[in-house]
Image (cartoon, rainbow, N blue to C red):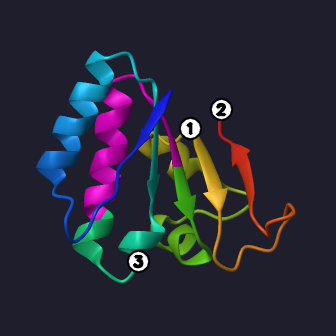
Amino acid sequence: MGISVYSGDCYTIRANMEYIDMASSLGVTRLFTSFNVAMGNRLAFDEVVHIVKYAKSKDMDVMVDVSPEAFKLVGADIVDLGPFYQMGVSAIRCDFGSKDRPNANGRFSFYLL
């Protein structure tokens, strides 16, 4: 069971953290968020990184939606996923221009362990 949280217009960092706290207290162990919704807005991107780290501190597995731009922003590439792992990401779902190993929807996921 999992939840999704997003940074941006109507989702404050405080509201997201409270939602994570509530979900964690109810036994939720997975969180999905997106770096893509924060692209072009450094503050929103920093908030997503904070959300990832906070959810990880609650022992949640965190999956993030990423694009090639997000790879550049965190200093990762398809060969070196370390920056994602170091911030607490458990899995990534590549989207928006990712061309390696697409599935039927043109998207793919792989897990960081």
* Residue picked out by circle 1: 90
Residue 23 as seen in the image, left or right of residue 14: right
Q: Which residues are magenta?
A: 46-63
Q: Residue furthest left?
A: 14
Query: What label does residue 113 carry, if any?
Result: 2
* Residue picked out by circle 3: 39
Question: Which kind of residue does numbered mark 2 sit on?
Answer: Leu
Q: Residue at x 31, y 17 (%)?
A: 26
Looking at the image, tell me whether mark 1 or mark 2 is earlier in sequence order.
1
Q: Is residue 10 above or below residue 55?
A: below
Foreground pick, 106 / 71: 106
Q: Is residue 71 above or below residue 31?
A: below
Q: Residue at x 37, y 45 (%)?
A: 52
Residue 33 is a magenta residue: no
- 10 Å crowding of disc 2: few (<14), some (14-19), many (20+): few
Image spot of residue 100 (x, y percent):
83, 67
Q: Residue furthest bottom?
A: 40
Foreground pick, 80 / 110: 110
Secondary-structure class at tag 3: loop
Distance between the alpha carbons at the discs numbered 1 and 3: 20 Å
- 10 Å crowding of disc 3: few (<14), some (14-19), many (20+): some
Secondary-structure class at tag 2: loop
Q: Are marks 1 and 2 in contact (CB under 8 Å)?
A: yes
